[in-house]
Image: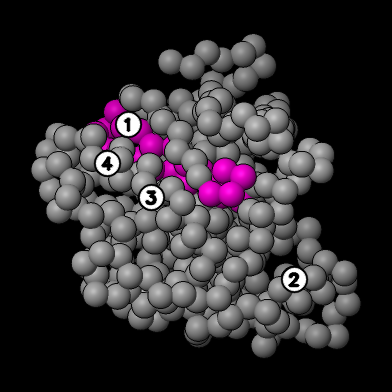
């Protein structure tokens, strides 16, 4: 049990799998160096029973995650999203390397052993997954899967994109795991960029991961539209007469983005909430996709840069929508600061060589 400090609120129990998974995804942002420093509010509702354990790898240890069993008999693998802060010149290297990895959008072949080839995928996300894969597989080998329900893989942003690739690696490793590995593999991806091309998406469906993959997307979040996918390219719909330095920066990134990606998984699109309305139910399928695309074009044309940035937040955007509950007013800023502080401590540890 993790002790709570006097100013820290009691956790709000997770009543659905999506709620438990967004808490688990946020927990991964509390990795400091090689240690997990939990924030009670998020950690408690995941209900870990054996850890979780920290896994990390890559240059400057920019790739990291948590893995552990929860009280409902599932193993949860939570992959951390992109670092969002730095503290000094040395720690800037980790921050810069993480963002550079996100921008490695050139597609490269993905060929897990035994797969016969799995199309082409985002080079940066594949590098991140492969940096962690030895640690992940080592943990999976230690589990008695006959006594477990299965494996749930989650993450926010970069971690969400990595979850698709990791699920494929686990699938093709099942024969080498105790008792045939996890009976079921689920993916719960929050604010996920795209990870692979149409061949990847077809193969993903062929091995039945598609039906157990859930993409959670908030209105006005630009990240789930990047890299540009085959049926919707926001660059070609961009109002080029709009002038704004930050919009111009995003436009420049899009100009260098390699196209030909394709979405995987079932969409749960969460429209914006206003104080005068009940929390809107998520939209799925073509209805949700059309609503998501219409909404992102609307805010882009309005030049609502702040709204676009705010929509990507795991704490202040995804968590409230999925819980249908405002983040508690008193601790909301403290929780955001705690995640920020964990990342600052992480990059300080890197700079010190810990």
Along the horizontal axis of the image, is 204 left or right of 65? Answer: left
Q: Position of residue 253 (x, y in %)?
A: 71, 73
Spatial CA distance of label 4 from label 1 is 14 Å
Q: Quadrant of residue 301?
A: bottom right
Q: Look at 57% across and 39% down and name the residue there.
A: 29
Q: Are marks 2 and 1 in contact (CB under 8 Å)?
A: no
- Whether the magenta-drawn stretch holds residue 77 is answered as yes
Spatial CA distance of label 3 from label 4 is 10 Å
Q: How is the image coloured?
A: one colour
| Rendered image: mark on residue 140 | 4
Spatial CA distance of label 2 from label 1 is 39 Å
Quarter of the figure with the C terminus: top right
In this view, the mark in front (4 or 2):
4
Along the horizontal axis of the image, is 113 left or right of 99? Answer: left
Q: Residue furthest bottom?
A: 236
First-in-chain label (4 vs 2): 4
Q: Look at 42% across and 55% down and name the residue there.
A: 130
Q: Position of residue 332 (x, y in %)?
A: 68, 33
Q: Secondary structure at mark 3?
A: helix
Q: Are marks 4 and 1 in contact (CB under 8 Å)?
A: no
Spatial CA distance of label 4 from label 2 is 39 Å
Q: Dot 3, crowdedness within 10 Å: few (<14), some or many (≥20)?
A: some
Q: Secondary structure at mark 1?
A: loop
Q: Dot 4, crowdedness within 10 Å: few (<14), some or many (≥20)?
A: many
Residue denoted by label 2: 250
Q: Position of residue 216 (x, y in %)?
A: 48, 57
């Amino acid at each position: 049990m993790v002790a709570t400090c006097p100013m820290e609120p009691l956790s709000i129990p997770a009543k659905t799998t999506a709620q438990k998974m967004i808490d688990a995804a946020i927990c991964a942002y509390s990795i400091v160096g090689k240690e997990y420093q939990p924030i009670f509010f998020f950690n408690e509702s995941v209900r870990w029973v054996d850890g979780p354990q920290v896994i990390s790898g890559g240059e400057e240890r920019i790739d990291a995650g948590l893995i552990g069993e929860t009280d409902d008999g599932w193993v949860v693998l939570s992959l951390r999203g992109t670092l969002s802060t730095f503290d000094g010149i040395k720690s800037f290297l980790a921050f810069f390397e993480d963002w550079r990895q996100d921008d490695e959008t050139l597609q490269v072949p993905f060929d897990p052993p035994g797969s016969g080839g799995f199309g082409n995928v985002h080079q940066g996300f594949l590098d991140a997954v492969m940096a962690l894969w030895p640690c992940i597989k080592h943990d999976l080998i230690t589990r008695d899967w006959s006594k477990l329900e299965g494996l749930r893989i989650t993450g926010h942003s970069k971690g969400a994109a990595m979850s698709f690739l990791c699920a494929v690696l686990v699938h093709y490793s099942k024969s080498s795991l105790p008792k045939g590995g996890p009976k079921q593999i689920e993916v719960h991806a929050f604010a996920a960029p795209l990870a692979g091309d149409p061949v990847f998406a077809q193969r993903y469906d062929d091995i039945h991961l598609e039906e157990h993959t859930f993409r959670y997307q908030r209105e006005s979040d630009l990240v789930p539209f990047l890299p540009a996918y085959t049926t919707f390219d926001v660059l070609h719909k961009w109002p080029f007469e709009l002038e704004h330095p930050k919009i111009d920066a995003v436009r420049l990134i899009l100009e260098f983005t390699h196209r030909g990606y394709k979405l995987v998984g079932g969409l749960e699109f969460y429209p914006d909430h206003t104080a005068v309305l009940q929390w809107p139910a998520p939209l799925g399928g073509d209805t949700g996709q059309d609503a998501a695309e219409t909404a992102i074009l609307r805010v882009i044309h309005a030049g609502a840069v702040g709204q676009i940035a705010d929509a990507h937040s795991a704490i202040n955007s995804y968590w409230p929508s999925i819980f249908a509950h405002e983040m508690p007013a008193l601790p909301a800023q403290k929780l955001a600061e705690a995640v920020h502080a964990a990342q600052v401590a992480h990059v300080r540890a890197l700079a010190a060589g810990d």
